[in-house]
Amino acid sequence: MDVRFHLDSNGQDLAIEHRQDVEPILEWNKEARRDEQQSDWGRHVARIPNVIYVKWFDEEHRKGNTQLRMFTPEFDAIVQKKLQDPEWAYLRVDRPKLQAGWR
């Protein structure tokens, strides 16, 4: 991941830009979705680019969750919720089997 710092023309405000070539990760995800995972224990669920982690972290901070730290159980729960959203389905590598019964 490439991190760049940009100083605003006023000389006081700083913007931080995170850049990453995510194409190899997304291609790996696409290939991994083709493989059936045999076990429910230790299933590989997703491969998430670092820039996405930073994006999700920044979104939470903008919402006021400034006590949040990355890779804590609280952040893991946020990541889990994001991965359930169809918008982020392309990050998932597991193929959930059809489930019968009540949810």
Image (cartoon, grey):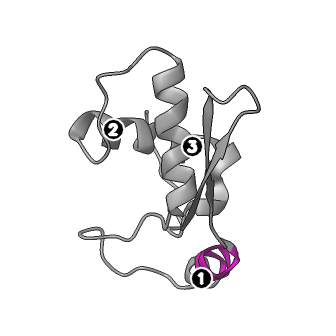
| Dot 2 amino acid type | Phe
Residue 84: percent from left, percent from top: 53, 43
The answer to which of marks 3 and 2 sits earlier in the sequence is 3
Q: Is residue 53 above or below residue 1?
A: above
Residue picked out by circle 1: 28
Identify which residue is drawn at 29% across, 36% down: 69
Which mark identifies residue 70? Answer: none
- For the residues labelled 1 and 2, the Cα–Cα distance comes to 24 Å
Indicate the secondary structure of the residue bearing disc 2.
helix
Corner quadrant of residue 72:
top left
The answer to which of marks 1 and 3 sits earlier in the sequence is 1
Determine contact: label 1, label 2, CB under 8 Å: no
| Dot 3 amino acid type | Lys
Residue density around tag 1, few if under 14, some if 14–19, many if 20 or more, within 10 Å: some
Which mark identifies residue 55? Answer: 3
**Foreground of the two, 96 or 42:** 42
- Of tags 1 and 3, the one toward the viewer is 3
Corner quadrant of residue 40:
bottom left
The span picked out in magenta is 23-30
- For the residues labelled 1 and 3, the Cα–Cα distance comes to 21 Å
Indicate the secondary structure of the residue bearing disc 3.
helix
Residue picked out by circle 2: 75
Q: Is residue 31 left or right of residue 102?
A: right
